[in-house]
Image (tube, helix red, strand yellow):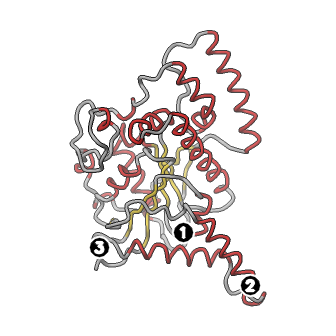
Amino acid sequence: MADKAEQAIFIVGIEHRSGTNFLADLLALHADCCRPLAIGEDFLLHHAHHLRQYAAGLHSSWHPQWRESASQGDIGAALGRGLLSVLTEQADRPGRHLVTKTPRADRLALYPWLFPDHPLLVIVRDGRALAESAVKSFGWTYSKAIERWARGARRILEFQRDSRRGPCRHLVVRYEDLVTDLSAELHRILAFLRLDPGSYDFDAAQSMPVRGSSMLKSQGQDLHWKPVPKTSDFNPLNRAGGWSAGQHRRFLARAGMYQQLLGYSVAGPRQPGILDKLHARWHQRRWERRIARAGLQPLERQAVGPRLAELDAADEQPLLLRRAA
């Protein structure tokens, strides 16, 4: 059996088709990382609200003096360690860091309660590209794909808002940054995770094959997750390149506010006419009111400080220098 991992690295996606497989495959190229052999997507947060209810009930059943010895936070962390033990028993090789992922941001707010000592990577992707990929891959309707992406975006933005009240060691990764500037983004991620870049195979990352791409469906093949060589026409950033102006308007009406808050373009596929400009102005005013009521803020790109990889992981919190995306 492989040695037990000291710390897990969690990856949570905004929704299916956000690139969690891609990011996990990239991290697996580091010598200190391992992965569960059987459980490919953990969904540990998906039903975590039941655990929160259990912990509250358990804590309230104790004598008041007993409660002083262990808080509900202590109970949550213990439950998290138990859940992780299921995954670490399946580690595919010796490694200090177990990489595990889930494609949806369900119950993301409960992450610090269950896993306070483990770093979190949250991966987001342009809503239009993700929706198109989900429609092609899974046969979803556009309405379903857009609504699910918007729900995930809201959870992530609320998590960002609430994490300012207390420490939660997390980093937001854009799928597009991995595609367009892989080496730089990998160095940023490795610094955040305190992983030695000298133990990472950057050449293998650049030539890594594609798994589970929706292009398989476009080519008349069944969707699968076996490695496929990357071809010159592989362009995951242009999945929604064929959208009509009507499709774009429907997306903006349902999810444009979140698209904007995550830092993605809300521009349409053609030069806007007078009607489009009026629609955009109306949406903008509506979004501003909703954003103010929810207390949400635009997502910021976290620039990892140069000393982060050298910080003592025992007590010090990572220094995150933030700049506007």
Which of the two discs, 2 and 3, labels the residue nearer the N terminus?
2
Residue pointed to by mark 1: 115
Eye-nearest disc, 2 or 3: 2
Camera-nearest residue between 198 and 219: 219
Residue 63, given in percent of the width and then of the height, sits at 76, 89
Residue for point 55% across, 35% down: 143
Residue pointed to by mark 2: 61
Classify mark 2: helix, strand or loop: helix
- Residue 70 lies, with reference to residue 190, above or below; the image says below
Which of the two discs, 2 and 1, labels the residue nearer the N terminus?
2
Residue for point 44% across, 36% down: 135
Residue 39, given in percent of the width and then of the height, sits at 38, 65
Residue 185, given in percent of the width and then of the height, sits at 39, 46
Tell me which amino acid carries mark 1.
Phe
Using residue 6 as the reference point, say whether residue 197 is left or right of it: left
Which of the two discs, 1 and 3, labels the residue nearer the N terminus?
3
Camera-nearest residue between 306 and 283: 283
Mark 3 surroundings: few (<14), some (14-19) or many (≥20) residues within 10 A: some
Classify mark 3: helix, strand or loop: loop
Label at residue 94: 3
Camera-nearest residue between 38 and 298: 38
Tell me which amino acid carries mark 3.
Pro
Residue 202, given in percent of the width and then of the height, sits at 26, 51
Toward the top, the furthest residue is 274
Residue for point 56% across, 65% down: 317
